[in-house]
Every structure is written in C-alpha cells, then in structure tokens.
C-alpha cells in the first residue's frame, strides 16, 4: 500500500497563515487591511485586463511590482482566497486564470462509483455533469457551488466544475479497516465515496485489519491528498453476515443504534393506560377488532373491525396506533424519530424509527391487550360508496392477530368455523369493488413481482422465492388507501398539512417509454410526453402474461416520478387522487405522526405548526425515505450475491431484463437474481447497440439480444464488495 500523500504542504501552511493574518487585520481596521484590499483589487484588475492569459503567483507579483515580502505573502494568500471564492481558477502547473463570467449555482453532489458525478440544483430539472478531474475535494452528498462550462454542440447534459464545498453532506463513513506499518486506512463500503480515508493512528484502539468500522471525515482540503478521520466505533468482523448487513445500512446513512437518552426516555413510558383516557375516548373494545400482518412482524400499527349498522350499511373501523399520545414534541424521543424519519426493513432485520419498547410493545396493537388508537370510522353503503366517516381518539382490544397466510385461508373459506371467516369474506368483496373502482378512475395497476431472501440461522441465504401478493395483502392495502384519501380530503384543505404527492411523469421519460414498448409491438398513446393513468393501465394489461411483461412493467415503473412529502397539494398521479396523505403507519413513518398531530390540533382548535417549518420536515422525511429504500434494496442485493456464490459454474435459463452499450442484463428464471453479460465477454462477433430496438446486434452474424428474450447463461463470477454478478452466454 503506497505511503499517503502529505495532507497539507508547508506552502499551504504559509498561505493559510498569511490569509488568517490578513483576515484578522481586515476585521480590526488596521493599515494592513487597507493594503490587503488594495492588492486584492490590483490582482482582480490584472486578470480582468488579461482575460485569456494565465499567471503563476510569481508572475502576478512581478507584474504588479510586489517586492516587499509582506506584499508577496498577501498576494499568494489572496490568490488562494480569490480562487476559493470563484473569481479566478487554478490551472495545471500552479497557474491562475480569470474565471469566465457565468452562472454559479449551488446544489447537492451525487458521485458515481467511477468517479464522476452530477449536481442537482433545486428548481432546475436537469442535473449538471461533473468530470472526476473537476471534482476538487467534493464528496458524495456535499452541498457545492459550481461553475458551468460552455455547452458543446451535441452535449446531452451541461457540464460543470466544483468551485467550492459549502457544506459536507457526510460527517462519517463505514468501511473496511486496514492497518499497515505507520499508517492505517478505511476503504468505504459506499462506492460513491471514491477515496480511502486515512486514519489517525491514535484513534485505532481495538480495530483490527479486516474489521468493519465507522470513521469520521474530519478534513479533505487538497484533491491530491486524501480525506482524514478518526475511528469512531468498531462494528465487527467483515466476515460476519450480520455485520455485513449492518455495515451496509450504516454506510448508506442509516442510524442503527439509539442514543442512551432516547432509550431511557422510552423506558419511562408506562404500558398501563390511565382511566382518564378510557373516559375521554370512543371505546371499541366491544367490537371484534383484528390485525393482519406478516408472520415475522412485531410492530402492528393498524387494525380493522366490521359491523352492520341498523340502516343496513356497513361500518369499517380503521384503527391506527396513537403514537402521538406517547411521543410528544421537543423530547429526545421525538428528536430521534425526526432524525430517522422512517423504519428501515433490511433483509434480515428491522431498524425501527422508535425504540422497541414503544414500537413492539406500548404502541403496537398486540392481541388481547388494551391499546390507544386514532381511528377512521367509515360508513359504506351496499354499493361500497362512502356515506360518511369520523376520526376519533379511541381505545381497542385486538381479538385476533392474523398472519397474511391465515387471513388468506379465511378468505378462501378453508376455516368456515373461525369467528372472522364471514367478516374477512365480506371485507374482501368490498375491497375488490373499491379496487376496481379505483382502477376505472385511473389509478395505475402496478403489481411488480418482488422476491424474499430466506436466511439460515447464521444469516446466510439459502433460497430466493417470489413474494406472494394475495387477496389478504390487497384487502389491507385497500382500506389503508381509503383512510389516507379520506383524511387528506377533509383535513388538508386550507390548513397546514403534509400530503403524499406524486407528480405526473416527466414527458421525456414517457416519450422514451413509448418508443421502448413500440419495439415490442405495443403502443402507449401520449401527447408530447403527457400520458393519462388509464393509458398506462391499458398498456400494463395488454402485456400481462406475455414474455416481455416483466421488463415492460419495470420500464413503466422507472418512468414514474418519485413520490414525496409536501405541504403543497399537487395530488397523487399514480392513485389518480386529488388528495392523499399518509396516516396509517405512525410507528414506522414520521409523516404519519405529523398528520396525527395536525388533525388533533384541528379537532382541538390549537395553534398549528408554521408552514415553513412543516415544509422543511416534509423534505427531510422524503430524503430519509430515499435512504431507507436504498438500504433495503442494497441489503437484498448483498444477499443475492452471497447466494449466487454457491452456484458459480452452473448453467441456467434466464430472460433478458435490459440492454445497454456495455452488455446484456439477464434475470435467472429459477434463482431470481440478475447479472450482466458484458460485451467484452460476447465472443465471436462485434456487437453494436441499436437504439431503435433497444438491442445489441452482431455486425457479422445479425444475432440480436433484446429485452424479453429467453437465453441460457453460465454463472461466471460474483463480487460481494461491488454487489455485482457476471454471466456469459452459453
């Protein structure tokens, strides 16, 4: 391992000291301050008068006649300062030149593992491309100031360079620790952090080579150097499957452990409900209330009841855990919940938003115990139309804890003697009616196949199976959608509120999708990229059952905008709903907790949270949701790669799931993992990418590979570090 480059040169220390003295002088109004301002203006004048020329520091000093040592030191320091402010630019060979006037913008940097990046500027749809050599000392996630380069003819994306790091997006990283002789480094697990972090040896402690550790990012000031930091904690051995998953989540930005003060505050909350709460709440303990959740679930935040009313209509009680009763604002619990904003469901564990004492016990709607709830009680007529509803603070006592499998058996009539058999059948029939009405209204019918990775006791993957979505899943989904829509309609208008917003898809993406499906012989009608949800539904139904169904469904899903939380109601495109909010999962989503509080404030006539503060919270929750989604997806991919290591050298059938200039993506039909056949490994011909048909075509043979084609591949290799799988065609 090479010796690390010096973090700061002696020359830099000299310039920094001079600049500091100059700054101190300016603030004190000394004669030196006046001289520094004079030199600053003279330097800027020199560059402005020689716009296309570049100068070394000595040339600048000679041109301006700085013979005095103090003047020369100030000149050198001011060159650094003017560069950091974006007035001039540094060019190779320690030369400086005038930075052309242009738009200087601020945005968030996203780095690709290959070193280049993109800067997303709020209010501008197009991201700006930054080459690796123009990255300066910026790291993934940093808030940066950029300068735009002139657009070249044919450029698909405007280029930019990093002028200044305004704020570090990351204060820590997670990676593999290596100690060699007089220095130690941490190689980040997050491939978007493209620099090793050199570690202060005094902080190594008990860390051993090969351990997964958390390291601080304390300084990174020269592109030719490296970030430096300290070991904050040792997570564990990188060979331990559980440690691998935890380290992966932490590397993406998931906070795994609760602070001691948060846990202490949670433990002080008593499970016993005061009698005063029973008296002031609507009592549903006399109803047959039940929950339906996955077999391994521990946090039950929603429950249902059904009863017939004297007028012949049906009452559906949608009971949601009353988390806001226990988690008050301006507490350690609340501050922690805000930071996390969501529970994270990894492949082998749940990292909860709230400590388990709350999420799994006090707030969870466990069977045969009394629990406080916030209920949306809906009256439906015989045509399953909403006649009315009310939202009330309540108390329940769940009579049954059903798994999805148990609920499905009841729906199918396999256990006719069960107390809930008729109830589940009725609720399911009503849910189907509501679902069909929703689709007719324009709600998009995405039903993408997901997978579940089964692990052994040591955390190693043993099989990958399709995750079934049956009537029991859709039943719960439909009543949660109903409650969320009704809540937003009544309490979101004219009041500070947090909506779940889903914008229409980008026009260019829809145009590309239309061209993509045309290559398969399908049509997606649109007007200049504007498409109705009904047209998308027609497409999805037309491909159902066909070989290309999976790739077209995935392509359609990718063309959609990302849903977000917002205080401005722009509607929900995917659900074809003008009003939508999240109300039904406050144990695991902070926006639901916010909505509970806002509704209670409206009911009580209390002071409401300012809209700007609410907007900042909504934006933060959207960002944390993206982090959680990435952690969940990457944890599954990690286990898929581990699983495929036991199948190296095997031949398997697969379906082409995507094609790019670099190769062909194939999903194995039986093993349910995706890998790539690289163009470099496709022997016997020269392949070209055909944009019109989204396929690779052999120049000599005419052999064509396109999405949806069935193929046979050899499993060649798999990289746990990069979470990539390589195939070759048989």
Image (tube, grey):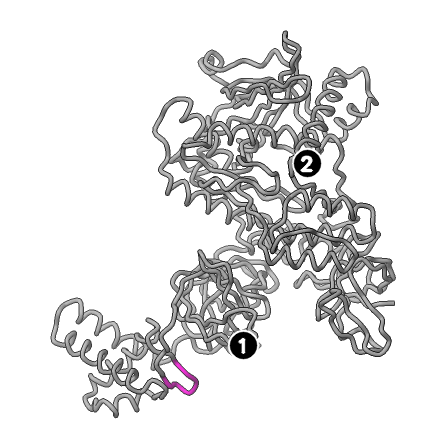
Where does label 2 land, which residue?
439
The answer to whether one can see residue 216 in this image is: no
Of the two numbered discs 2 and 1 on the same chain, state the one appearing first in sequence: 1
Q: Is residue 440 above or below residue 158?
A: above
Mark 1 — residue? Answer: 153
Q: Position of residue 166 (x, y in %)?
A: 38, 63
State the extent of the magenta-drawn residues as a range: 90-96
Describe residue 104's horizontal placement relative to residue 243 as left or right. left
Q: Nearer the viewer, residue 357 or 588?
A: 588
Residue extending furthest top?
310
Hey, which quadrant is residue 290 in on the image?
Answer: top right
Is 91 in the magenta? yes
What count of labels does the image hold? 2
Q: Does residue 119 lie above or below 154 as drawn?
A: above
Give me the residue at 61% from left, 63% from top.
210
In the shown orientation, is residue 339 left or right of residue 427? Answer: left
Q: Quadrant of the N terminus?
A: bottom right
Q: Nearer the viewer, residue 343 or 615?
A: 615
């Amino acid at each position: 391992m090479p010796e690390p480059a010096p973090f700061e040169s002696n020359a830099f220390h000299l310039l920094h000291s001079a600049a500091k003295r100059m700054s101190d002088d300016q603030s004190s109004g000394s004669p030196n301050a006046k001289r520094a301002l004079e030199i600053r203006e003279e330097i800027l004048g020199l560059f402005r008068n020689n716009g296309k020329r570049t100068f070394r520091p000595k040339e600048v000093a000679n041109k301006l006649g700085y013979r005095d040592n103090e003047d020369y030191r100030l000149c050198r320091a001011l060159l650094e300062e003017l560069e950091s402010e974006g007035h001039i630019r540094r060019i190779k060979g320690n030369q400086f030149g005038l930075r052309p006037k242009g738009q200087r913008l601020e945005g968030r940097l996203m780095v690709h593992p290959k070193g280049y990046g993109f800067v997303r500027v709020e209010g501008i749809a197009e991201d700006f491309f930054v080459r690796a050599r123009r990255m300066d000392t910026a790291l993934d996630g940093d808030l940066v100031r950029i300068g735009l380069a002139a657009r070249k003819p044919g450029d698909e994306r405007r280029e930019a360079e990093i002028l200044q790091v305004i704020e570090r997006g990351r204060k820590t990283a997670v990676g593999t620790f290596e100690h060699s002789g007089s220095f130690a480094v941490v190689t980040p697990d997050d491939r978007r952090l493209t620099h090793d972090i050199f570690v202060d040896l005094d902080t190594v402690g008990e860390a051993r080579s090969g351990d997964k550790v958390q390291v601080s990012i304390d300084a990174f000031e020269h592109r030719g150097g490296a970030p430096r930091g300290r070991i904050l904690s040792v997570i564990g051995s990188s060979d331990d499957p559980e440690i691998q998953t935890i380290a992966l989540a932490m590397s993406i930005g998931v906070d795994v452990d609760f602070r001691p003060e948060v846990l202490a505050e949670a433990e002080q909350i008593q499970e016993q409900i005061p009698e005063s709460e029973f008296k002031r709440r609507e009592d549903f303990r006399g109803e047959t209330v039940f929950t339906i959740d996955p077999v391994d679930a521990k946090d039950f935040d929603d429950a249902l009841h059904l009863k017939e009313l004297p007028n012949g209509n049906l009452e559906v009680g949608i009971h949601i855990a009353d988390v806001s009763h226990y988690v008050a604002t301006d507490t350690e619990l609340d501050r922690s919940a805000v930071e996390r904003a969501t529970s994270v469901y990894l492949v082998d564990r749940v990292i909860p938003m709230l400590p388990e004492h709350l999420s799994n016990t006090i707030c969870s709607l466990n069977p045969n115990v009394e629990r406080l709830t916030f209920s949306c009680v809906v009256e439906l007529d015989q045509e399953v139309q909403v006649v009315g509803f009310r939202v009330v603070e309540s108390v329940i006592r769940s009579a049954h804890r059903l798994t999805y499998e148990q609920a499905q058996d009841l729906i199918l009539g396999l256990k006719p003697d069960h107390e809930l058999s008729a109830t589940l059948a009725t609720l399911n029939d009503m849910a189907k009616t509501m679902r069909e009405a929703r689709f007719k209204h324009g709600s998009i019918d995405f039903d993408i196949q997901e997978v579940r990775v089964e692990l052994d006791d040591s955390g190693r993957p043993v099989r990958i199976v399709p995750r079934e979505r049956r009537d029991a899943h859709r039943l719960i989904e439909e009543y949660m959608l109903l409650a969320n829509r009704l809540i937003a309609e009544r309490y979101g208008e004219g009041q500070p509120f947090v909506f779940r917003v889903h914008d229409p898809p980008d026009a260019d993406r829809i145009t590309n999708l239309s061209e993509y499906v045309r290559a398969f012989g399908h049509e997606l009608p649109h007007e200049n990229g504007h498409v109705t949800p009904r047209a998308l539904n027609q497409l999805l139904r037309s491909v159902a059952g066909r070989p290309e169904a999976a790739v077209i469904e995935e392509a359609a899903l990718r063309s959609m905008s990302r849903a977000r939380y917002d205080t401005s109601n722009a509607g929900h495109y995917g659900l074809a709903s003008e009003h939508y909010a999240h109300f039904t999962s406050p144990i695991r989503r902070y926006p639901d907790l916010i909505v509970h509080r806002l509704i209670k404030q409206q009911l009580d006539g209390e002071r409401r949270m300012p809209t700007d503060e609410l907007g900042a919270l909504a934006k933060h929750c959207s960002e944390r949701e993206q982090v959680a989604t990435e952690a969940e997806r990457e944890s599954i991919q990690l286990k898929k790669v581990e699983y495929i290591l036991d199948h190296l050298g095997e031949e398997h059938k697969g379906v082409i799931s995507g094609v790019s200039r670099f190769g062909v993506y194939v999903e194995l039909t039986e093993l349910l993992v995706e890998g790539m056949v690289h163009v470099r490994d496709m022997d016997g011909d020269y392949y070209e990418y055909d944009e019109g048909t989204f396929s690779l075509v052999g120049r000599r043979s005419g052999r064509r590979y396109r999405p949806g084609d069935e193929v046979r591949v050899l499993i060649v290799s798999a990289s746990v570090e990069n979470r990539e799988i390589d195939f070759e065609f048989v």
